[in-house]
Amino acid sequence: MNGAAAIICAWGSHPAARKRDGSVVDLMRDAATQGKLFHLGLNKDGSPKHPLYIAAGVQPERLEWSVR
């Protein structure tokens, strides 16, 4: 992750993902503080949308994440 210019977060809102999303972002805390985390859309619960449900022309946006 250190060499990446951007990291796209896209785990969706599946119940299994909700149990780990905070842990995953915590693992990527350095990338988050460097502004490297992005999403392609957010679900109603604030989780980053899974790529299966995103139109091809959607551009990444910076992910502002607070661990719950």
Image (cartoon, helix red, strand yellow):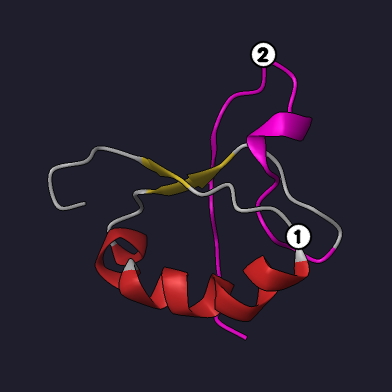
User: How packed is label 2: few (under 14 Cα within 10 Å), some, or many (20 or more)?
Assistant: few
Quarter-of-image position of residue 34: bottom left
Q: In the rendered view, tell whether residue 50 sits above or below residue 19.
A: above
Which stretch is magenta? Answer: 45-68
Which residue appears at 53% of the width and 78% of the height? 22
Q: In the rendered view, tell whether residue 68 sits above or below residue 52.
A: below
Which residue appears at 29% of the width and 59% of the height? 31
Question: In the visual, does 3 lie left or right of 25?
Answer: left
Residue picked out by circle 2: 57
Q: Position of residue 40 (x, y in %)?
A: 62, 36
Q: CA distance from mark 2 to mark 1?
A: 21 Å
Question: In the visual, does 49 lie left or right of 2?
Answer: right
Question: In the visual, does 68 lie left or right of 26?
Answer: right
Query: Is 63 a magenta residue?
Result: yes
Q: Which mark is residue 13?
A: 1
User: How packed is label 1: few (under 14 Cα within 10 Å), some, or many (20 or more)?
Assistant: some
